[in-house]
Amino acid sequence: MKNLFRAAAIAVPATLAASAPAMAQSLDQQINDGFANATGWFVSFIFSPFPGTTFPWIVAWLVIAATIFTVYFGLIQFRAFPHSISLVKGDYSDPNDAGEVSHFQALATALSGTVGLGNIAGVAVAVSIGGPGATFWMILAGLMGMASKFTECTLGVKYRNEYDDGTVSGGPMYYMTKGFAERGLPLGRFMAILFSVFCILGALGGGNMFQANQAHAQITNVVGEYPGWITGIVFAGIVFAVIVGGLKSIAKVTEKVVPIMGVMYVLTALVILLMNANMIGWAFGEIFRGAFTGAGVAGGMVGALIQGFKRAAFSNEAGVGSAAIAHSAVKTKEPITEGFVSLLEPFIDTVVICTMTALVIIITGQLIMDPSTGMYLLDEGASTIQTVDGNKGVALTSAAFSSAFPAFKYILAIAVILFAFSTMISWSYYGLKAWTFLFGEGHTKELVFKVIFCIFVIIGASASLGPVIDFSDAAIFAMAVVNIVALYCLMPVVKRELISYQSRLKSGEIAKFH
């Protein structure tokens, strides 16, 4: 690819070639500055701390909700785990049930929206700021988040709209309107509109711009620097080609891409961990020590906790409500079954993949601590040591994996592209459903959103990581504010569904279809 860019440069007149880098840099900088100025107030509000502390109120909001759902449903994430596996395998699937996709396709589509660059860049950001101890809080957040995901995805299926052509529309905006009306609760419509607005912002931010941004960062790590808008245009064209086909087209892509990219990434991490098996015990020791002492982290234990929960929430989206949109399209007549399937997401995404990423970073020695500042540093060789910050996302993970396999940066570049691509096409569907809820169904209205979504791909690839990741977090967490209020109001409905299903399963009324 380097040769391709060199050939193109030779073909350009000398005067234009000389001015092109400055023009490109100027365009990228203008996009970045304009974006940061426009979104700064929104980010500040979402992440504002409790008075007199540095603890963001939104993190507590997610942690408390996940804890309540875990207790209310009696540790459902552990009790239902075996049955969840059976459902994904298709043991209880009836192809004649209403819906568009299978349990596995729904899981793959939702996972493609969560298993992504949050697992690569997000984990690196967490451990670089919060230290190894942030990993412990990520794992805990993932385990508890399984109960939040179970709750929202059950409701997504129960209150979905089923149309004559076989398509469905579901998600928080539908259980807010229909579920609240059913229980005689006020403000359902208002909350649904508010959620839809935040969902569109989340789709354009975390599900789009962040992905394009980090994909461009990894590509330049392999081929050298070039303007971000070039990556953006290429990605926008490919994404548009897929999303014009609707959910079935997206599902066909994700059910192939997600297993490939997941297996490729996890196998590489496993090989590195096995090569350093004697250090795994030490690494977990660092994780536990850092979780409760916060040694070397500004803010101590709270600093590690905040980073762990922030990154886990951004990665697995439990409580956000986004996955409920994808799971709503499943073929089933039992809403609770998709709740069971969905609880596997945070486990795969955070407990397995995020933990493996963190272990590789810790074991390969990429992070060292500066005792004078208490900050973690990125060891880039004897000659240079740079402070790790948000802009080091993919670079830190790449350095960790490449320390064991020098050629891994090329594998990671492919993985990042696949992660970014699959996440973008899934979030395009989430944003589209929020868009059609606000403006109505119809080909033209859907096309307008898809074009807007692809424009934001270009913006994301051109902006710097700082404003992008801040806006991404804020938009997605804003969705959780509205969604969790609805989950509190409707969790008795889920409890009734759970009790009914379990009693019929135990009596044999519900049996394996095959």
Image (cartoon, rainbow, N blue to C red):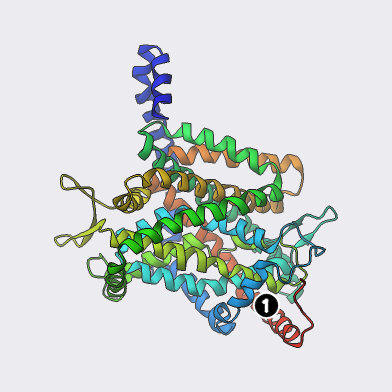
| Image quarter (top left, top right, bottom left or bottom right) of the N terminus | top left
* 173 or 144, nearer to the observer: 144
| Percent position of residue 128, x then y | 30, 58
Rendered position, 306 above or below 225: below
Q: Is residue 340 visible?
A: no
Which quadrant of the view contains residue 20? top left
Q: Residue at x 60, y 76 (%)?
A: 488
* 355 or 12, nearer to the observer: 355
Amino acid identity at mark 1: Val
Q: Residue at x 52, y 60 (%)?
A: 478
* 123 or 449, nearer to the observer: 123
| Percent position of residue 193, x then y | 65, 58
Q: Which residue was labeled with disc 1?
A: 494
Q: Residue at x 75, y 72 (%)?
A: 334
* 276 or 481, nearer to the observer: 276
Secondary structure, mark 1, is helix
Outermost residue to the right: 164
